Image: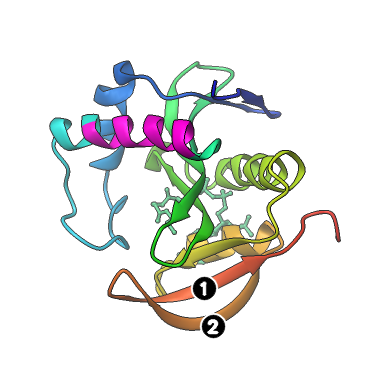
Amino acid sequence: MTTPTLTTENLRLRPFTPQDTPAMHQILNGRDVLKYFPGPQTVTKAQVDRMINRLMAHWQEHGYGLWAVEQHTTGALLGRCGLQRIPETDEVEIDFILDPACWGQGFATEAGQASLQFGFAQLNLKEVVGIVHPDNLASQRVLQKLGMQFAQATEYFGMAVHRYTCRSIFLE
Ligand SMILES: CC(C)(COP(=O)(O)OP(=O)(O)OC[C@H]1O[C@@H](n2cnc3c(N)ncnc32)[C@H](O)[C@@H]1OP(=O)(O)O)[C@@H](O)C(=O)NCCC(=O)NCCS
């Protein structure tokens, strides 16, 4: 399927392309960006290349996935956001990783809202989950601002996490 492009007040959520590797490499290696992810805290260009290929393949396989997030005013790549399948639990999770240079401007919330709306309105998903490190308060705050509810402290990917859920964004 063709990956749709979504437009929000400040952002464009567009398909990733292999040309995004250098900018995404820089973003992922930004200070504290991978702090709350399992595994190494730095990534190589080859790993980012493979990540982008996987993200593009995810859209083909599932009809949804992660978008490249761009800012209207600058056209710069800010990071990634969207929905991805957790194979181990057969859940759909919301994910966002943005450039530290743009944190605190509401962009993750804005991109997250568009992603959830796409999931519920276009994909007819019943539920979207948010899986977050217990100390990742910024991410938990974004999930809360998206209307997601804390469900439980549990373990995913061999890591202690907080699990948030959202059944419908249309109930608010
Ligand atoms: C999580 C992340 C995407 C948030 O992006 P963002 O664009 O700054 O998010 P927003 O501006 O929409 O909202 C951030 C909220 O967290 C709050 N926040 C930031 N740091 C915080 C902290 N240490 N403790 C508590 N709240 C915090 C902000 O004040 C804001 O809430 P507010 O609007 O009520 O003031 C960004 O920090 C990031 O990319 N982190 C690294 C990757 C990551 O951890 N992704 C999540 C994986 S689950």
**How many angstroms separate mark 1 from mark 2 (CA)?**
5 Å
The answer to which image quadrant residue 164 occupies is: bottom right
Image position of 40 with respect to 72: above or below? below
Q: Amino acid at mark 2?
A: Gln
Region rendered in magenta: 50-61
Q: Residues within 10 Å of mark 2 (few under 14, many from 20)?
A: few
Location of the C terminus by quadrant is: bottom right
Look at the image and say whether residue 55 sits in the magenta stretch. yes
Q: Earlier in the sequence, mark 1 or mark 2?
A: 2
**What residue is disc 1 on?**
163
Q: Amino acid at mark 1?
A: Arg
Image position of 150 with respect to 79: above or below? below
Magenta residues: mostly which secondary structure?
helix
Image position of 133 with respect to 17: above or below? below
Q: Position of residue 48 (x, y in %)?
A: 23, 34
Kindly check if marks 1 and 2 are in contact, taking CB atoms under 8 A apart as contact: yes
Q: Position of residue 4 (x, y in %)?
A: 60, 24
Query: Relative to 94, is 7 on the left or the right?
Result: right
